Amino acid sequence: MITLYDYWRSSASYRVRIALGLAGLGWQTVSVDLLAGEHKAAAHLARNPQGLVPALEIDGHLLTQSLAIVEYLDETRGLGLLPNDPSQKARIRASAHAIAVDLHPICNLGPARHAVSQSAGGITMESWMQHFIAPGLAAFEVMIDGGTYCHGEKITLTDICLMPQVYNANRWGVSLESFPKLRAAIEALSVHPAFAAAHPDQVLQS
């Protein structure tokens, strides 16, 4: 049995849910409520010393870090998320990392809440998120090739990183109007079964 230690609104967990869906795998979910602090409890710290989600039990392994998990699924289940050509692989990783490594961490709940609490009212959650998400996506728009998906006609690691960030952009009122390549990818990915099933609203209702 594959077990995903998950939080419905976690961007990192969302990525892994998409990849599991693309692989056609079934899994059981164990919710780790971030708002209730369950990620800092001893039981979860035993799974992931960082106190983060997701964690994935699969093939006799306990894996952490969403990008590492997605690449594991890519390599063991043949998802084809990265091309063989080294330069193209580097370009796709660069655009994926622009979101997952650079943009997502600074917009995570911990840093954002700390900034708000220390600002004496000068920063709100909305202003913090908008300040970082909008320029981050503007750079991302330039980095991707466009087409049906972010890099042409095949789903890649970049698409898996994009959609959770789109959810956050919509949540915090960031306009996507000036990003035509990004919006084209969103339109195609939104109706893909693996992406649709992984959406936080679907997880919350299940």
Image (cartoon, rainbow, N blue to C red):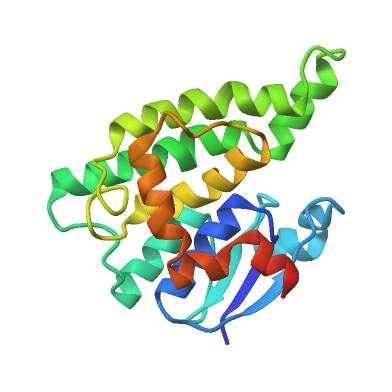
x and y, in percent, of residue 29 in the image? 67, 75
x and y, in percent, of residue 33 in the image? 80, 59
In the picture as drawn, the residue positioned furthest to the left comes out as: 85
Vertical order, 19 against 3 (above or below): above
In the picture, the quarter occupied by the C terminus is bottom right
In the picture as drawn, the residue positioned furthest to the front comes out as: 177
Give the total of numbered labels.
Answer: 0
In the picture, the quarter occupied by the N terminus is bottom right
Determine which quarter of the picture holds residue 7.
Answer: bottom right
Front in this rendered view, residue 79 or 46: 79
Determine which quarter of the picture holds residue 118.
Answer: top right
Taking the image as shown, residue 118 lies to the left or right of residue 15, namely right
Q: Residue at x 46, y 39 (%)?
A: 99
Q: Residue at x 49, y 34 (%)?
A: 176
Q: Residue at x 22, y 52 (%)?
A: 152
In the picture as drawn, the residue positioned furthest to the bottom comes out as: 1
Front in this rendered view, residue 35 or 55: 35
Vertical order, 105 against 147 (above or below): above
Determine which quarter of the picture holds residue 188.
Answer: bottom left
x and y, in percent, of residue 74 in the image? 34, 67
Taking the image as shown, residue 75 lies to the left or right of residue 29, namely left
x and y, in percent, of residue 109 in the image? 72, 38
Q: Residue at x 87, y 12 (%)?
A: 120
